[in-house]
Image (cartoon, grey):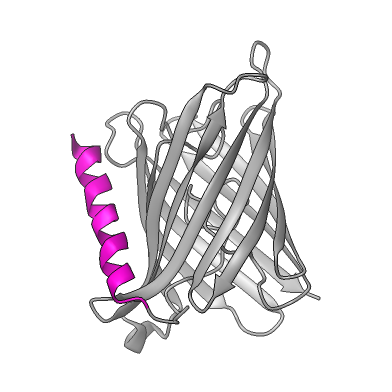
Amino acid sequence: MKKRVIAVLLLGTLAVTGVFAQNVTAGSANSMTLNGSTGLIIVPDARIGWENTKIGVDVGYGFVWTGGQNFDHLPRFAVSLFQRFEISGLMQLNDGLQNFVIGGKFQLTKSGGTALALGGDFEFYNSIGNQNSAKLYLAVTYSGNFFGMPAVTSATIGWQMLKQGSFSSQFIYGMGFSLSLIPGTFKDFVYWVTDFANFSYTVSGAQVNAASRGAFNTGIRIHPIKEGRFNLVIDIIGTDLLDDGDRGMSASISGGISF
């Protein structure tokens, strides 16, 4: 029930910011999701890492901890090509290599603060008894002002193929926003990032458990370097906060350069 309430609130935020949509981008910090693609926390958006240069490369490392010895180490990369394409990758490490994910995204259109993209990823399991999986998604992102603060909202829908060769597995959805916190004080360097999704950064073994009712994730994104050819982002996130026993925390850092 709580997660339904959160989903309704996030949908309301999407609607409100859509009403006040403007050509603003200050509410968004281009950064990696936990599986490497550009987006929020779990949810990929319709943007790519470098939209104003032909080639950009980002690398990052993050972890998710849910108590005790329950750690996922998540080194990642993303390559932006020709202001339209993105290729991303993730290694999920937990007592050795557990999964490897390779993703791709094509930005279909971008006008002002609004963008539409088609993406997907393929997950290679490294665990006995599991099978590879893939998902395809469509993402929309648009900008607006929320209570006087610049915000960028995103929604993603798609299909998760949980087992190789199966095309009847699960409809996926995710939604969320990036909100520039008190821009007059923090000068668009600090953001509140939130998303809710019924999928996680990997299908198998992810510390964020979205399998039954979805997962609500929220935290702070700090963007100290974002001008010119360089980019640096730091995330401090609470994961799956509405599920007792599955709650965790994540911290990550990513940086990049354009050519």
Q: Is residue 169 left or right of residue 75?
A: left
Q: Is residue 213 visible?
A: yes
Q: Where 164 falls versus 145 (above or below)? A: above
Which residue extends farthest bottom? 184
Residue sitting at 42 percent across and 86 percent down? Answer: 187
Q: Which quadrant, please, contains the C terminus?
A: bottom right
The residue that appears at 34% across and 37% down in the rendered structure is: 247
Q: Is residue 54 above or below residue 67?
A: below
Residue 45 locus on image (x, y percent): 52, 57
Q: Quadrant of residue 148?
A: bottom left
Does 100 sit left or right of 167 as displayed? right
Query: Which quadrant of the rendered structure holds the N terminus?
Result: top left
Count of numbered circles on the image: 0
- Location of residue 249 in the rendering, given as x and y in whole percent from the top left corner: 41, 45
- Is residue 10 on the magenta stretch? yes
Classify residue 151 by image quadrant: bottom left
What residue is drawn where x is 41% and y is 36%?
A: 198
**What is the span of residues highlighted in magenta in the rendered image?**
1-21
Decide which of 242, 119 is in the foreground and name it: 119
**How far from the left and from the top, in percent, is residue 63?**
54, 45
Closer to the camera, 9 or 109? Answer: 109
In the image, residue 65 lies in the stretch drawn in magenta: no
Q: What residue lies at 54% left-to-right and 31% top-to-bottom?
A: 160
| Nearest to the observer: residue 62 or residue 259 | 259
Q: Is residue 194 visible?
A: no
Please, what is the dominant secondary structure of the magenta stretch? Answer: helix
How far across and how far down the image is residue 28, in percent? 47, 71
